[in-house]
Amino acid sequence: MMKYLSTLLFIVVSFSSFAQTDGITETLRFDEYLGYVKKFHPIVKQAELVIDESQAKLLKSRGAFDPKFEVDYDRKKFKGQEYYDRLNGMFKIPTWYGIELKATFEENSGDFLNPEAFVPDDGLYSAGIKIPVAQGLLINDRMASLKQAKLFREQAKADRDIFVNTILFEASMAYFKWLQAYNELSLFQNFLTNAEQRFRGVERGAEVGERAQIDVVEARIAINQRRLSLEQSRVKFLKAALDLSTFLWLDNNIPIELQPNVIPDVNSEPVIDTTFNINQLQNNDAILEAHPKLLSLDYKLQSLEVDTRLKANKLLPKVDVEYNFLTENPDVARTFNTAEYKGGLNISFPLFLRKERGDLRLAKIKLQDTEFEIDATRVNLQNKIDALQQELDSYVLQNDITQQMVTDSERLLVAEERKFQLGESSLFLVNSRESKLIDTQLKAISIQYKFFSTKAKLFNSLAVNPEL
């Protein structure tokens, strides 16, 4: 695919030189075009920022478990007397289950110290643990934040696939509209050539008396009708080319414009089927279960479940137990004993729990709302996919019918032209047969566009992110 992208880049950069060379055209294949859109379009790059944002949030939430070093130093000296000189250093390690490990060092001196601040001359060391035995043990804000950040990262990947698929779908529709306009332009160019040849023949016949002068007038009307249709189709083709250009960008975010000598691939159906992987989209029901929209909602549901568990945990009383061993000689392990310690117990519990109960109720409502959304989304996607698959089957039949109609209309036109040359028909009937053929071919082109568009809609409904 990179070879195709390089080819396209060469085409785009060299547009001006191509345009100066008469009769040289370049074909832009569908898979090359989509590969270029996926690689360089700003919205695709913007979708990647969602992943970067989720990674940054995950890094931020992991920061809550970073070890922390704190130093608190206070000193007061007045009129030559040292009131106090206090140094308190602490190293804390937060752990997963709300347990906090810490080590401290205290060194205090002065004439007016609080008695509890007296420590040995070489300082006092402690090593201890703080445990929440109720609220915050099995789940806490740090734990919930990290779990939700991981889920958000996975959800962001699914959302990125949806964003990329949407821009590829819109780009595909622009290509199909461009292809339809080109087919119509080629059609009217061919019929204008036929009308001009017929006019010259009728004009020469009128000069030698074999044709009536009114036939010259009618042939000229037919030419002008074809010229008008050709001009209208040319404007339509130029507009479609400009719409297609909005999806073409260079690597450094520079938009590029499609030049008139670049044309679509008129035999795009096999490439479209390969790019969209139509056979798998139609037959593999497992793709729906891996749908990015459902995955995104599932990650959202898991995140809400974490939040609900956290809110339920807030109903428990807050009970923190702390125990610290004290020693003057931390290098000697036996100096740490249970006879010398500093401990504590902290208990708090709101009487009515109105805030906590309200938060839990809101969390459950959000959880239930997301469950309903998942069920509705799954049914909507399944129905939409089934409808598109039936529509594709119908367009296969419609294509066969219109191709048969085109073939029969061509045979009728050829027969009418032969009768006209033998003098057994009129130019009016020939033009009428030709108009019917044009209408039939335009209908065939329109059905082909709808057929390709339906394939793109199926591709979009499954939010597939192909490797291009």
Image (cartoon, helix red, strand yellow):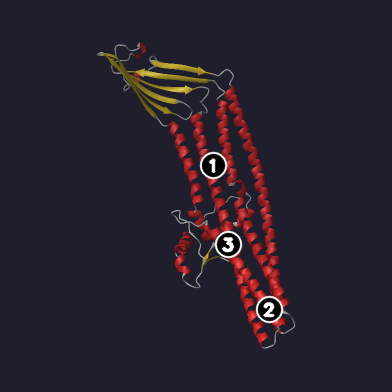
Residue at (56% x, 32% y) in the render: 307
Amino acid marked by disc 1: Gln
Residue 29 vs 74, above or below: the answer is below
**In terms of sequence position, does the residue under pointer 1 or pointer 3 come before the other?**
1
How far is the residue under mark 1 from the one under mark 2? 69 Å
Residue bearing mark 1 = 155
Q: Quadrant of residue 271?
A: bottom right
| Residue placed furthest toward the bottom | 208
**Residue tagged by mark 2?**
217
Instruction: Find the distance from the CA under tag 3 to the CA under tag 2.
Output: 35 Å
The crowding category of the residue bearing disc 2, from other C-alpha atoms within 10 Å (few below 14, some 14 to 19, many at least 20), is: some
**Looking at this view, is 396 or 183 the one in front?**
183
Give x and y (percent) for residue 12: 47, 62
Q: Residue at x 48, y 27 (%)?
A: 98
Q: In what element is the residue under mark 1?
A: helix
Dot 2 falls on a residue whose secondary structure is helix
Q: Amino acid at mark 3?
A: Trp
Q: Earlier in the sequence, mark 3 or mark 2?
A: 3
Circle nearer the N terminus (1, 2): 1
Where does the image place residue 360, in percent across and percent down from the top left? 59, 28
Q: Which residue is mark 3?
A: 178
Kindly report which numbered mark, 1 or 3, lies closer to the viewer in this rendering: 3
* In the image, farthest residue toward the left: 80
Residue 105 visible in the snapshot:
yes
Residue 382 lies, with reference to residue 423, above or below; the image says above
